[in-house]
Amino acid sequence: MSRMTIASELETAADQIAETSRADLQIMLRRAALMLRNVTGLVLEPNVDESLSGLAAEMGQSKTGLVSTIVGDWLIANAYLPVPYALDRESAVDGNA
């Protein structure tokens, strides 16, 4: 179960607190506690953190989203992840193979 799913369940339970059973609340709170316990932050050098914060603000993204994009693009560029789209025979490409 993802963090977003758990957060959504908690928000829904908070909106409908009178209708949510004690057992359901207990399960959701235990899941949330487990997720929080297992979260590790990314510690960056101050100059790197400052540069990322500035770039994220410039691009209108969160710093976390920007780091995720950068790492994902790097993994694809270095063949650690597959290219998310395939070229078909009709696609034009530049260069030599």
Image (tube, grey):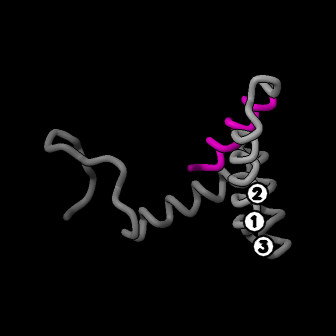
Amino acid type at circle 2 is Ala
Residue 43's mark? Answer: 3
Q: Which residue is mark 1?
A: 37
Measuring from the top left, give residue 10's x and y in whole percent. 74, 38
Locate the C terminus by quadrant: bottom left
Q: Is residue 60 visible?
A: no
Residue 46's mark? Answer: none
- In this picture, is 22 found above or below 37? above
Q: Which badge, 3 or 1, is on the more N-terminal residue?
A: 1
Measuring from the top left, give residue 22's x and y in whole percent. 77, 38
From mark 3 to mark 1, how far is it between C-alphas? 17 Å
Which of these two is toward me, 20 or 91?
20
Amino acid type at circle 3 is Val
Could you tell whether 80 is left or right of 73 in the image?
left
Q: Give SS at disc 1.
A: helix
Residue 50 among those drawn in magenta: no
Q: Give SS at disc 2.
A: helix
User: What residue is rendered at 39% in x and 63% in y?
Assistant: 81
Could you tell whether 95 is left or right of 33 in the image?
left
Cβ atoms at labels 2 and 1 below 8 Å apart: yes
- What residue occupies the far bottom of the structure in this picture? 45
Q: Which residue is mark 2?
A: 33
Q: Is residue 43 visible?
A: yes
- In this picture, is 92 found above or below 52? above
Count residues near mark 3 (Cα–Cα under 10 Å), then give few for <14, some for 14-19, many for 20+: few
Amino acid type at circle 1 is Arg
> What range is drawn magenta here?
1-14
User: What residue is rendered at 76% in x and 57% in y?
Assistant: 33
